Each structure stands twice: as structure tokens, then as C-alpha cells.
Image: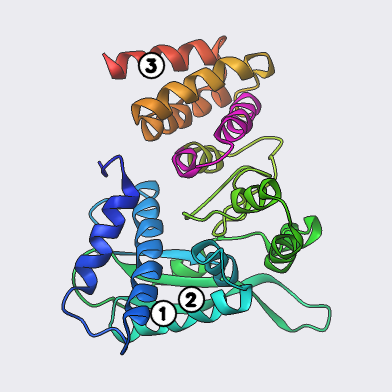
Amino acid sequence: MLPRDRKAFALELARELLAGRHVGRTRQAREHAERVLHYLVYLGLQQAQRSRQRRASEVAVHVVQSLAAVRLWPEAKPETARKRFGVALRRLASLGLVRHRGHVADLRSSSGRILYDGTVVRVRLRPGQVGGFLPEDFTHPWRDLAADLAAGRTAKALIRAREVSHTSTEERDFKTNTLKDLGFSSPSRVLASVDTWETSLPPKPSRGQMRDAIVDLELVEEARHLAVDRVARMMAAALDDAASVRYFAGLLWRALRSGRLYALAQQLERLMAEVEEGGVRKPGALLASRMGKLAA
């Protein structure tokens, strides 16, 4: 199991990976590189747990650089933040700690031009040199760009929203909507992941979508109650139990506070399979019972 405070653990690991290495000529260059590596390692740890590669020495993550940049440097102009991120990423690549390449989207422009929906980054989670890309790094459906374009969920739109925000409340809403740690699915208007961009509420969530949504609750730092409510509604849809949304929210809060989100996600996946097969009358109660036995 990863430590509860993954951010602190990721920072410690990032500093260990950079120890003794020459990172630019200035203190600022090193600080920028450390900040970006901290971010990528954190995403990598999250992805490793989600994909059950807990002993992995490196892992692939998907990053939308412009959004990651404004997340890391919220006080800077978006273009300045983007340049800082890009320079730091290249420095890390020159040190052999990351390898990065644009990810081709699953659609083309109206003129047939290739579109990119982000960057795939292989990042080290243990000391050593990063290896080459794997085929699955680029076949994995990191992002549904067509759906995001249709819904206006683009980096340009979110950055524009940040630029026109004036009040502290609006700024807080923007930060909430552009957090990434990571790897992966997040609540609309609460945590629009800068990695997975799965911000819509699926009418019938898949097991993978539910697993990611539950595990990623730990990443939500603001308006967490809204995020829990959204995931509870996803659980209700997944289990065909619309009357138990508040009940599922209670389960999520207990798992969140006890550090058992991953265990809850595993139990839910198992239960969803059983519901699909039929014969489960009260899925919510059964889920709570199983979680209780695990905690005993």
C-alpha cells in the first residue's frame, strides 16, 4: 500500500531521483524541474496503484501540459507557466527520468489533419534511467477528445475561464475544475482531471470508470462534498439503485476517512459483476456488509 499522504511521499521520491544531478544553472531551474517531477511522480504513483503495478519502476501517464502548467503555477500567466513546464520536462528527459511524446487523438480535424489530445509521459518511480515506450502507452484510451470538444472541455476554454475570473470564488472554482493529479477521472465542476478529462456523468458507468472515480476522490481538495455526491450518483447508476444515493455517499465518506477507497473500489467492481449476472436484491447493503467485514 502507498502511504496515506501521497503528495509528501511523491515529493520525497522526486527529490531522491534528482539527488546529485545537475538540473540547469540556476536555483529556479532546479525548483521548476522538481515541481514538475513531483507532479509526474504523484500521477505515476496513482496510476501504478490503479493499474495494480505497485512494484513498477516506471509507469506511463497522460498529461495535458497547458493545464498541468497552470495547476503548478497558478500565479503566472498561462503562457509563462506552459513554457516553464515544457523546459522542465525537457530537462528531466535529458536526465533520463522521463520520456515524453504527443498522444494522437482518436479523431482528425475537418481537413484531415492529425490532432493531439495531450502528452504521454513515462516517469521513473525508482532510481534509474527511464526505458522506452510500450505499445499500450499509445493504444490506451486516455481521453475522449470528440466528447470534450462537443462539451467545450478544452484546455483553451478552461484557461480562458481562468483569465476572466475576478473574484476569489471564481478563482477557487477554476482551480477545482483544473486539478490533475492525476491520472485520471474526476467530477464535473469539481475536479475536471487534467489527465483523463472524464468529466461527464455516464448513464451506466463501467467498472473501470467507477474504480477511477472512487480512487480519485482522495485527490479532491476543494468542494469534496460535491465530488462525493457525484460519485455516489455514479454508484447508484452502476448498481441500478437510484434510491440509495445518500447511502452510497455515506459509504464513500467512511472509506475516504479511513483510507479504504481502493478497497471500496475493488468490492464495487465485484458487486457490479454480480448485479449484471442477476440475483442481488440489495446491492448497497451487501456492499456495506462486505466493507464492514474487511474492516473487522
Mainly helix, strand or loop, the magenta region?
A: helix
For the residue labelled by badge 3, is the local secondary structure a helix, a strand or a loop? Answer: helix
Residue picked out by circle 3: 290
Residue 122 x %, y %: 38, 71
Cα distance in 3D space between marks 2 and 3:
44 Å
Tell me which amino acid carries mark 2.
Phe
Q: Nearer the viewer, residue 76 or 160?
A: 76
Residue picked out by circle 1: 88
Cα distance in 3D space between marks 1 and 3:
46 Å
For the residue labelled by badge 1, is the local secondary structure a helix, a strand or a loop? Answer: helix
- In this image, 249 relative to 111: left or right? left
Crowd tier of the residue under label 2, counting other residues whose Cα lies within 10 Å: few below 14, some 14–19, many 20 or above: many
Instruction: Count up the numbered dots.
Output: 3
Q: Are marks 2 and 1 in contact (CB under 8 Å)?
A: yes
The numbered disc on residue 85 is 2
Q: Nearer the viewer, residue 140 or 233?
A: 233
In the rendered image, the quadrant that contains the C terminus is top left
Rendering quarter of residue 235: top right
Q: Nearer the viewer, residue 232 or 92?
A: 92
Cα distance in 3D space between marks 2 and 1:
5 Å
Tell me which amino acid carries mark 3.
Arg
Residue 216 x %, y %: 48, 43
Residue located 42% across and 29% down the image: 256
Give the mark nearer the N terminus: 2 vs 3.
2
Magenta stretch contains residue 223:
yes
Q: Which range of residues does the magenta coloring cover?
A: 215-237
Crowd tier of the residue under label 1, counting other residues whose Cα lies within 10 Å: few below 14, some 14–19, many 20 or above: many
